[in-house]
Image (tube, helix red, strand yellow):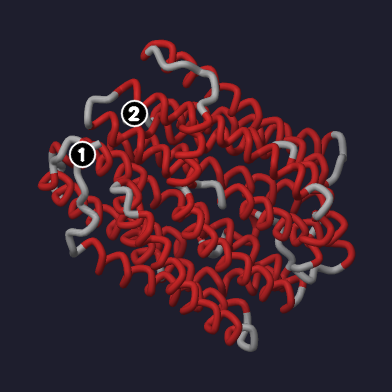
Amino acid sequence: MPITSRDREILRLAVPAFGALVAEPLFLLADYAIVGHGMGTTAVGALGVAGTILATLVNLCVFLAYGTTASVARQTGAGNHTRAMRSGVDGIWLALGIGVALIVACWPLAPAIVELFGASAGQAAQAVTYLRISLLGAPGMLVVLAGTGVLRGLQDTVTPLAVAVGSFVLNAALNAWFVLGLEWGIAGSAWGTVLAQTLGAAVYLVVVARGARRSGTPLTPDLIGIKRAGTAGFALLIRTVCLRVVLIVGTVVATRMGEAELAAYAIATQVWTLLAFALDAIAIAGQAITGRALGAGDVAATRAATKRMVQWGAWSGLALGLLVVAARPVLPGLFDADPLVAELLLAVLWPVALFQPVCGVVFVLDGVLIGAGDQRYLAWAGVWTTLVYLPAAFLAADFGVAALWCALGAWMIARLVTLVRRAAGTAWLVTGA
């Protein structure tokens, strides 16, 4: 593919976004590696359960990033810079409120939530410890989401990259010190992540506050604006709930297969998540470019950019799939997996690699439609594709953890069908602020 000016615009946004996005799963991958070396299979399984719960709570609020990116980008494209920053400030206040609410609601319920996964007694106790400590970082995690959305909407993906890299380095250092040095166990892993995420949030607060002052936007909470941000994110919340249901059901099914199966599934999930965030870099560019182009009323540019980003997504997915195949023999050793876990993980990595090209196209089109503000369609599509996955996952329970990943592949194909069908039409091409 020859590099065009449109490609350079996509890469200008996508390459820094790639670095920022992969930092999030690297947080947990670093935790898995450190906990695996220091504490063994039971602790890795506990981290898999607690990590899935925490990721579910945080990712249910991903609309704080996606919705903010779309609204800020659209207002920027329309030339309304003050309204763009007002949307960003409202999103951050909403993130703080939701983060505090998560602590209050989920702290006392942590044992009951962990119990739903059917983990062994040893795994459950450690999972509760990790979850409760990690909840203290929820406000910071959500502010990071909202702040990232503001900067992406302003077409800035470099600053989020710098914050993400700094947070990852700090997270890895603190976890190694707390778990391996001070021997705090799984609690040390949780504290390291909380501190790293909270400091990252503080950086975003400073950056957004400076931008708001430059545009003359007040930093005080605007209840009407906060309510508007929450209402706009409701459809994205439904979409995200469907995504998390898929991942939770997969973890539950793997948990009931046994400790080794759960450990293999948990590691493979983090590998897949790392790949997904890498592919999502193009989707982030899609959100920003689509929102800005439609805000400026340029439908032709939106169509052309979408076509090019789909090509980038497909080729990137193919490249990542081949990378997984090449790295497959060495991955179990990175997590100090015992022989049974290593054998299961090697089998699981085949379907993980196979479906990467599908994932590449799906993530790009998902980002484009989010940038266009087509959240209602994405919510309904999420419901239908989840209904495709559920029977496939429960059927796979009798055939092993590799079959469970094939069920995830069927889900991705269902998403591909719904997204391609929508993108081929015109209902999502709504222009103006």
Specify the farthest residue to the left: 300
The residue carrying pointer 1 sits among few (fewer than 14), some (14 to 19) or many (20 or more) residues within 10 Å by Cα, namely some
409 over 208 or under it: above or below = below
Q: Which mark is residue 154?
A: 2
Residue 195: quadrant of the picture: top right
Relative to residue 264, is residue 283 drawn left or right?
A: left
Distance CA(mark 1)–CA(mark 2): 17 Å
Residue lying at 77% horizontally and 36% vertically, measured from the top left: 191
Residue ID for mark 1 = 432
Residue lying at 75% horizontally and 53% vertically, measured from the top left: 36
SS state under label 1: loop
Residue lying at 88% horizontally and 62% vertically, measured from the top left: 122
Pick the quarter of the image with the C terminus: top left
422 over 306 or under it: above or below = below
Q: Amino acid at mark 1?
A: Gly
Q: Amino acid at mark 2?
A: Leu
Residue 412: quadrant of the picture: bottom left
**Which of 34/155 is in front?**
155
Residue lying at 52% horizontally and 83% vertically, measured from the top left: 392
Percent coordinates x, y for residue 119 in the rendering: 80, 68
Q: Which mark is residue 113?
A: none
Q: Nearer the viewer, mark 1 or mark 2?
A: 1
Percent coordinates x, y for residue 173 in the rendering: 69, 32
The residue carrying pointer 2 sits among few (fewer than 14), some (14 to 19) or many (20 or more) residues within 10 Å by Cα, namely many
Percent coordinates x, y for residue 228 in the rendering: 45, 39
Relative to residue 295, is residue 333 drawn left or right?
A: right
**Which of 247/26 is in front?**
247
SS state under label 2: loop
